[in-house]
Image: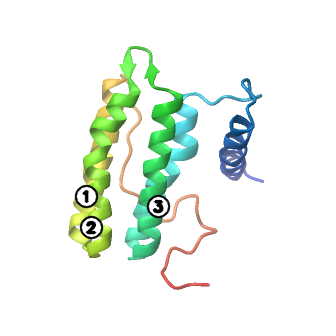
Amino acid sequence: MSSRRQTIVFALIATAVLPLTIAQGDPSPAYRPGLGDLMTMTVQPRHLKVGLALEHRNWAYAAFEVHELEEALEHVARLVPKWRDLDVAGLIKGSTTAPLEAMEEAVKAKDVARFNEAYGQLTAACNACHQSAKLEMIVIQVPKGGGPFANQDFRPGRP
């Protein structure tokens, strides 16, 4: 198995197992992801999937993934409310609420132009946050192709 696939498999397993461990009341799970881990395992894949759903005009899936992205950001804010001297929870809420709401409205209206604009605003907000954290080398972009989700068909109405 390639290291890229191993990374994806690990991220998916960790994303599924960690909430179960915490929910069962274990105060010290064997692995407690940091901010970067949470962003890589939960936020970045959701951002990518939202873009791919839009690319294929799969509005139902786009609506689902926008909600999942919103939840992923809420989890990050709750689990890592402060990082170094940054108010992570405040930055997430302040910079992502408006674009996420605009994306939800655009999905309901099936308005590609409005969705693209809101998605671009969300992507810019991610990059502004990275710059605030002095992590300007982390640059998020609108997806260009299927990326690591080659095993998922993003076209609507496929069994």
Labelled disc at residue 53:
none
Labelled disc at residue 106:
2
Q: Quadrant of the C terminus?
A: bottom right
Q: Is residue 85 left or right of residue 49?
A: left
Whether residue 104 appears in this view of the structure is yes
Q: Which residue is mark 1?
A: 102
Q: Dot 2: within a 10 Å radius of its alpha carbon, few (fewer than 14), some, or many (20 or more) residues? A: many
Q: Which residue is mark 3?
A: 65
The amino acid type, in three-letter code, at marker 2 is: Ala
Q: Quadrant of the N terminus?
A: bottom right
What's the residue at 41%, 66% (across, down)? 63
What's the residue at 32%, 48% (across, down)? 123
Relative height, residue 159 to residue 24 (above, below): below
Q: Is residue 152 left or right of residue 75?
A: right
Q: Dot 1: within a 10 Å radius of its alpha carbon, few (fewer than 14), some, or many (20 or more) residues? A: many
Secondary structure under tag 2 reads helix
Secondary structure under tag 3 reads helix
Secondary structure under tag 1 reads helix
What's the residue at 49%, 55% (across, down)? 68
Question: Mark 2 and mark 3: span between their CA atoms?
Answer: 13 Å
The image quadrant that residue 125 belongs to is top left
Q: Residue 76 appears at what percent x and percent y?
A: 49, 36
Question: Mark 1 and mark 3: span between their CA atoms?
Answer: 14 Å
Relative height, residue 86 to residue 107 (above, below): above
The amino acid type, in three-letter code, at marker 3 is: Glu
What's the residue at 60%, 70% (across, down)? 152
Q: Residue 49 appears at what percent x and percent y?
A: 48, 61
Q: Nearer the viewer, residue 111 or 74?
A: 74
Whether residue 56 appears in this view of the structure is no
**Label 2–label 1 contact, CB within 8 A:** yes
Q: Nearer the viewer, residue 13 or 147?
A: 13
Q: Earlier in the sequence, mark 1 or mark 3?
A: 3
